[in-house]
Image: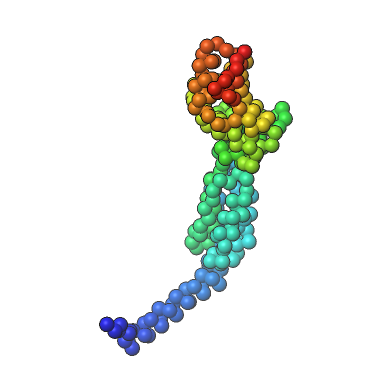
Amino acid sequence: MRRRMPGRKAWPWLAAALALTVLAFGIVWATPLFAVKEIEVTGTEVLDPAEVAEAAEDSLDRSILRADLDDIAGEVASLPAVKAVDVTRSWPSAILIAVTERDPYMAVPIDDETFLMVDSEGVVFDEVADIPDSIWIVELGDPGPGDLATLETIEVLQALPPDLSDEVERVESPSPASVTLYLEGGRTVTWGDGSENDKKTRVATRLLESGYRHVDVSAPDAPTVS
């Protein structure tokens, strides 16, 4: 079946529509009415909103269509405290940057008054003097997502049952295979690495309930106590 081509009467309307589209695009592209005048940042607590807004400053006073949203998002995402970011245009003259910040999971002391904030992926994203009561205090030599001791510690902590985790006062992880839990009352559990966590939990719980103060379950089939 042959497709019917638009009749001659339709061509002027199509040409007019195209002309209007080009004109509208030109107006948005070139006129000050659609120039970026404002950068709005939401979702920041750790970060300074002004620091986030700097990623879009090159777009100020230029057409909103010229704003490279992917480039802005990439620059914001490079900030350590940013877990996710969404950048959009808000017509006629604003750019919106919505940030999702990382949540603290561990606090790593670096001296008597300062702690590094580390999230559940091992990313170090802040340095603070005061820490929330709800996060783990963990001694690590070189915290970060590429540090095996950091990753093994997170795996251990995420596997702890509530009854045991509630008793943990601090954690020491001098190496990936030497995660040690310091419990209330001066008791310790040498956990080892993040393997066999279910078995280690059962053995450690049974031995602690039996009254032992220092338990080593790094080899859960052959635990030691004192």
Q: Quadrant of the N terminus?
A: bottom left
Residue displayed at 31% across by 86% down: 7
Q: Quadrant of the C terminus?
A: top right
Query: Residue extending furthest right?
Result: 111
Residue 197 at x, y percent in the picture: 52, 28
Query: Residue extending furthest top?
Result: 211
Q: Is residue 110 above or below residue 186?
A: below
Residue 78 at x, y percent in the picture: 62, 51
Residue 113 at x, y percent in the picture: 70, 29
- Is 5 on the left-hand or right-hand side of 110? left
Residue displayed at 47% across by 77% down: 22
Residue displayed at 60% across by 39% down: 122
Query: Residue extending furthest front?
Result: 222
Q: Is residue 162 above or below residue 93?
A: above
Q: Is residue 25 above or below residue 191?
A: below
Q: How is the image coloured?
A: rainbow
